[in-house]
Image (tube, rainbow, N blue to C red):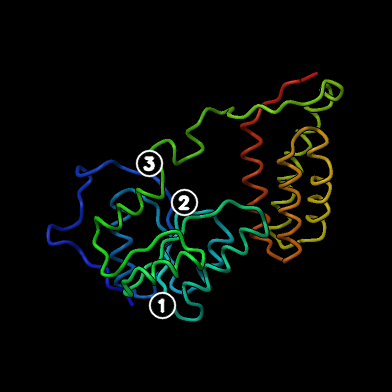
Amino acid sequence: MSNLRPEHAGLPSDAAGTKREGEVLLVEDNPFGQAFARRVLEKAHYRVTTASKGGEAVESARKHRFDMILMDVMLPDMNGFEATRTIRANESATGLSRTPIVALSAHCSADYDEQAKALGMDDFLSKPVLPAQLLEMAAKWIPSGEAARPQALPRTWEVIRVSEDIADLVDDYLAGVHTTLQRIRELSEVNDLAPAARLAHDLKGTGAAYGFERLTQVGRQIEEALRQTDAPLAALIAAEAKEWLEGVSWTAAG
């Protein structure tokens, strides 16, 4: 049930504030409340994905990385607290960064706010939610402008130091890793888990040896996702790792 409502002055205009970018997962079972919050966020240039149930929210968070999740507490099939616990468990198991989750609830008290945070939520909005409050919360948790989007950074933003002893092998190794990550993504997308897991295991065993510790972590994360038969998450991790690798350079160190 939703109590989102507009201010008497209407929705904020584009001229009233800075245009922003960011991806929001809006979890709200009331269709009118969902439509209103979506309109407010999209008018401020956030990209919004919606879910009406806790289980849908968990699945969306597995398949795609959002900049913020707005989570209604009272949901059918799985309440917002349970959905948050599941999302946090998935993030912990796979080593993914923590997505800000903001609780939406008509229960307004300091104790309820603390309970939400103790259960894995990062912030709290009490219903009825005004447009200005919603946008203030989005601005708090989602960086604006270029800082919000990795694509806006220079193409090379990390330099890896590798041993001089293997420097002549690194370019061929990285070319192979690109192919491996692409293949893991393709296999995961068709739910062919066994060969994808073998490739992830090989990646886990070689990344740190070449000086690319993150690739070992990626292999471990993909392997764990596939062990849990979470092929969409494995494909997502592989895609993000491939994007990261495209922005990395390396230098030989004695």
Name the residue at 58% across, 59% down.
63
User: Which circle's residue, 3 or 1, is located before the other in the chain?
Assistant: 1
What residue does disc 2 label? Answer: 67
* Amino acid type at image mark 1: Met
Q: Is residue 177 above or below residue 44?
A: above
Q: Is residue 165 above or below residue 71?
A: above
- Residue 200 in the image: x percent, y percent? 78, 50
Q: Is residue 127 left or right of residue 224?
A: left
Q: How far apart are the two marked residues, 3 and 2, measured between alpha carbons?
A: 11 Å
- Residue 93 in the image: x percent, y percent? 67, 60
Q: State which quadrant residue 114 falls in.
A: bottom left
Q: How far apart are the two marked residues, 3 and 1, measured between alpha carbons?
A: 30 Å
Q: Secondary structure at mark 2?
A: loop
Q: Which mark is residue 144?
A: 3
**In this figure, what is the number of numbered marks?**
3
Q: Secondary structure at mark 3?
A: loop
Q: Secondary structure at mark 1?
A: loop
